[in-house]
Image (spheres, rainbow, N blue to C red):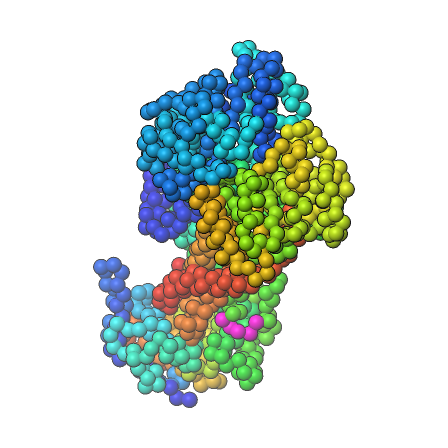
Amino acid sequence: MKYKVEVRDVAKVYKRGKTEFRALDGISLMIKGGEFLSIMGPSGSGKSTLLHLLGALDKPTSGDVLIDDISLSSLSDDDLSQIRREKVGFIFQQFNLLPTLTACENVLLPLKIAGQNTPEARSFANEVIKAVGLAKWCDHLPEELSGGQMQRVGIARALVIKPALILADEPTGNLDSKTGEEILNLLKDCQERFNQTIVMVTHDAKAAAYGGRIVRLKDGRVDEEMEVSGVNLISNL
Amino acid sequence: MLTLFRTFNLRYLSKHKLRTATIIFGVSLGIIMVVATMLVNQSILRSYRSLIDTAAGKTGLQVMPNTRSGLPASMVDEVASVKGIKAAVPLVISDTLVSVKDKPDGGLLVYGIDPKKDTAARDYTFTKGRQIKAGETSSIVITKTWADENKLALGDRIGLVGVNGIEKLTIVGLLAETGPGHTNAGQFAVMDITAARYTFNRTGKVDQVDLILKADEKPETVQRRVKALLNGRAEVEIPSARGGDVQKSLDSMAYMLNLAAMLALFVGTFLIFNNLEISVEERRFGISTLRALGLGRRKIFSLVIAEAIMLGFIGSLFGTIVGAGLARVMSGGLTGYILTMEKIRATDFGLTPQILAMGLLMGPLVSALAAIGPATRMLNVAPLEALKPFETAWRPASSTWKLIVSALVFFTGIGIIIAVVALPSMSEGFARDPNQLRNLSMVSIFLSFLGSVLLMPHLLSSSIGRGSVHSFVLRTALDNLRRVPGRTSATVTGMMIALTMMIGMSALVTSMTRLLDDEFNKMLGWDILVQTTFFNGSANVPMTENFGKKLATVKGIKAMTTFTTGYLKINDNNVMLHVLDMNTYFDVNDLIPQDGKHEQMVRDLKKRGTIVVSTMLAKKFGYKKGDIVTLNTPSGKKPFKITALINYFSQEPGILIVGRGDYKEYWKDDAVDGFEMKLEKGQSIAATSKAIKDRWGKSHGIQVREGAEFKKQISGMISQAFSLNNLLVYIALIVAAFGIINSSLISILQRSRELSTLRALGARRRQIKNIIRNEGLIMGGVLGALLGVGLGKSLILVSANTYDLPLAFYVPWPAILIGFAVAIGFTGIGSAIPSKAALKREIVEGLSYE
């Protein structure tokens, strides 16, 4: 499935007391369906803010974000929830697993929230669980899992609703380099296997190189865009 | 340290005004109840002692009848002859009804004195007028206080309700507010003893003899001599030593108050604990920063405890002031019963140093204890760890020893309840006295409460199994409750206490009302009752048998019987005495023997020397049917045979019924307190009642009651007796709602990231709201209400056994339904604030929450 995300002249301003902080300052961006886009930039450059706007977690101060030609700024809170539920899968740096649920229960959570706990959905969930290598750890609570295993659960949870768009916020930030590599390979594999659009925020250039395109942000604006082949980029970096 | 306290603690408290106020409120709640209860007790005792002291004057000993029937006047000279006595001063005492300006005006304590002799006992000070003179039968002296209250002056006339109708007397003197003028808070009058005897049916009698002792005589020595002379015909006491009866009455009254105060303190402590936990949790970051900057554990601990002590002190101060005010309100309702027996009015509500110290220290102490948990938890967090974003870890198992201790406490409580309820023989041997049984029951209820609180975490972990609940909203709510079982159980307990009080009390009132209804239907057959007594007031003016003969001439009366009530001293207990005319009683009413042998009982009761006792009294003194008991009468010790035990609802320690023939002979009293009439078939109750009222109402000051109205009044009295409890129930419910708000607030504070994750995964606002509401509902509505009903039922069983009454447990469905509705309503309100707070936070903010 081809998918398109469009960011039109988006600004995001945070107010803290009398102080204003401009996190994004008129960004425009087009993301093609099936693309693996990496967003890089120093701290405070607006990477995570952009990711939150793409995922309908937050609303821009000005400008618009369109997913599948649907303008997010015109949607109600319930409609935004529906977009998150059906079209977006999130992968967090802190994993954000529910500590009372087992690994598999965490994976099935989006289906339960959406009320889609059908046999077909569960069968696909099993497929995903196997694909991320979690079958053995299904009944374990998050605190019994390693960082890499927790992130696998996070990825499986993002994939289980078959979202067209996967947003990953520093997915390898809390992992050692070997595990990080495994996770990135898994993401890449999923993108190819399930033909999903992936937007990944990262500090790490090696991780960014897994994407087909890199957007570098600075002070809330697009500073640089690179369209390179992964292998060449890695060697250049 | 002080600077740190000012910048770190005080600034936080002033920023979070509502939370600070809630902690202070929690402390105050318990203190209010404790101080009010102590003050009411103290005030009644003080007033009683003041009554005795002011009325006793220079009296060294007092001779009093061991029942209400009075003493033969000849006893005055008899005791005057005892060695060591300088003078014997007779008194006729009546708590009568009075009419001012031809309108009924409540009760007045009247002393009939011998003006010549009385000066030996009391010094009267007058603001106006003079003392009555001997033989001056139409004059009266009142207090200035009462005169001012009723706008009366010298020369005005007031009417006293007497056995011969209303006697009009002229005011000749006004007593100053000192000495005897202080008696009964000024509701006091003095008249000539001869006039008092005529008015109150005391011909040839006195109600009390005050003995003035010779100098150098010890009261105890003379008391022994007088006692030996009287040999049970009357009691002789040292005025300053009196008060035991009032103390007993107070013990009974104070039971509910103490229970309520204990619960209020418990609920208050829980409120403090919850709020301190939330405030400490909120400052976790600040505290850990202080620790990272080098502040020691001990200082951190001291800061938290010092804050709790300060808030506790403010709460205590507030609670003590409000408690003192509440004591005045409470005393009005609570002393009604005591007034009827002891003729006192609680007035002095001054805080003694002990009560003040208790009130002011209890708050800081309780707060400091409640703060130990949260403060210790803070100490266990390493500086580095505390600076990291936190999530409450899942703790699946609780330790076995905790489970064992919790179960032990719970089952000990339940065990005692079972022992008291199901094994009467065991409890009888262990504690026959209702007071002991009641205390035991109180301990058992407290232990089961405590046990259920301790067990709750274990029950939650095991009963709410994983995977069994498919609804994501319900499952998430349940999981959170399991995650923090300690907090959950504290909240559940808050709601449980509120609902237990609500449902338990309702069941108790229902059971008692039904029991009374049942007794009334079986035993009381009268259509009309004629009395001069206020139904629930303090005055009691007897009538004569002659008046009964006049009443009997009213058309349409099929049968009429009399009753007289009083008290009898048995083993230092004031036992209610009912005097019934056994020749006519069964034509109008009935008695139901416990063993079902009705005919035999009626036959036996028509014989002289027989009595009936209530099962409660039998239990207290170990009486059985057929026992011969010796009663002290004004004619000396007399033997009576118990012909039956009856279920008869009354106040402690129970009642004893004696035949009118025996009463007249041994007690030398023919007074009648009430005439009960059965009308001919088809005769209108209302018309007959009106005819009696028209003919004698005004001249004799009589009250005419109809059966149906009487039953309604009794039910009303029971409900009224529990009205204070209703107030406490509402307080408890509000506190429980606060508990739910607090628990949910802490919970969303700790789960900020989690809730935001759910929102990021597409959960709607409504779903998040429902998760939080479900938590509240499970805590308050389901667990709280279920345990509340269970404990309510045990309260009924304990009460039934304590008083040996056939109290059946009626499931109070209306109260349960209302309880559930109220719990759900309060939970809804309680969880609305946290859920609003949860949704107010932006998803992004929650995800990055640190």
User: Quick check: A63 above or below B592?
Assistant: below
Which residue is more in the foreground, B59 or B298?
B59
Question: Does the magenta stretch mainly form a helix, a strand or a loop?
Answer: loop
Residue B462 painted magenta:
no
Residue found 35% across the figure and 65% down from its top = B840
Name the image quarter holding residue B662: top right
Please provide percent x and percent y for residue A22.
25, 67
Of B392 and B116, the residue lying toward us: B116
* Image quarter in which the N terminus of chain B is found: top left
> Can see residue B456?
no
Residue under the point 50% across and 81% down: A116
Q: What residue range appears in magenta?
A: B469-473
- Where is residue B24? Give x, y as percent: 40, 46
Query: Nearest the camera: B340 or A88?
Result: B340
Looking at the picture, does residue B802 appear above or below residue B210? below
User: Is residue A79 positioned above or below B396 on the image?
Assistant: below
In percent of width and height, residue A158 lies at 46, 76
Instruction: Determine the residue positioned at 41% across, 81% down.
Output: A87
